[in-house]
Image (cartoon, grey):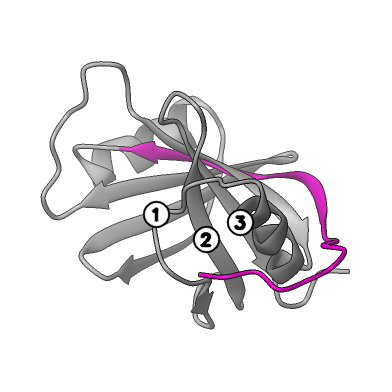
Amino acid sequence: MACNCDNCGGQIVGLAHIGVRVSDMEKSIKFYTEVLGFELTSQQILGTSHLAFLNIGTCLIELIHPANYVAREAGQIDHIAMEVKDIDMLVCRLIEKGVPFLSNSINDAKDLLDGVKNIFFTGPDGERFEFFEYYNRK
């Protein structure tokens, strides 16, 4: 990826969701809905992963069950997703600062949550972050 802007803009507007890797999707959905009181708002297959989105108040949890699930020693939080405006400009800003990305372009997921754009990048200790822009939010 390359950035050619003179004054990169964009805005982080809040936490979009928290991605949690799970070994058993049905068991996890039951826990989040029946024990914690979350509402299951959508499920879908994206690539080889089964995704489920659960909501309570202002908190959105994305359960992720990859086909090749392997438990991690340090926990199952997969990434921190920040809701953004003007994802292209924010990506450009990170490119200028030398931030490493986990893909070569912004993903355009028209079927995910009524349409989103997203991209993953890493922090200084390898933590995974995601910029997440809804098509139809103002």
Closer-to-camera residue (15/45): 15
Residue on which disc 2 sits: 119
What separation in Å lies between label 2 and label 1 (alpha carbons)?
8 Å
Which of disc 3 and disc 2 is earlier in sequence?
3
Give the answer, above or below, for where 96 lies relative to 34.
below
Q: Mark 1: few, some, or many residues within 10 Å (few <14, many ≥20)?
A: few
Residue at image position (21%, 17%) is 73
Closer-to-camera residue (77/60): 77
Residue on which disc 3 sits: 95
Q: Which mark is residue 137?
A: none
Where residue 111 appears, as percent x and y from the top left, is 49, 81
Residue on which disc 1 sits: 102
Of tags 2 and 3, which is closer to the observer?
3
Q: Mark 2: few, some, or many residues within 10 Å (few <14, many ≥20)?
A: many
Q: How many marks?
A: 3
Where residue 97 appears, as percent x and y from the top left, is 65, 46
Residue at image position (28%, 59%) is 50
Of tags 2 and 1, which is closer to the observer?
1
Where residue 79 appears, as percent x and y from the top left, is 46, 39
Q: Is residue 96 found left or right of 6 in the rendered image?
A: left
Q: Is residue 19 found left or right of 5 in the rendered image?
A: left
Q: Is residue 23 found left or right of 61 in the rendered image?
A: left
Q: What stretch is highlighted in magenta?
A: 1-21
**Mark 3 touching mark 1, by CB under 8 A?**
no
Identify the amino acid type marked 3. Ile
Placement of the C terminus among the 4 image quadrants:
bottom right
Queried whether the magenta region covers residue 19, the answer comes back as yes
Give the answer, above or below, for where 38 lies relative to 131.
above
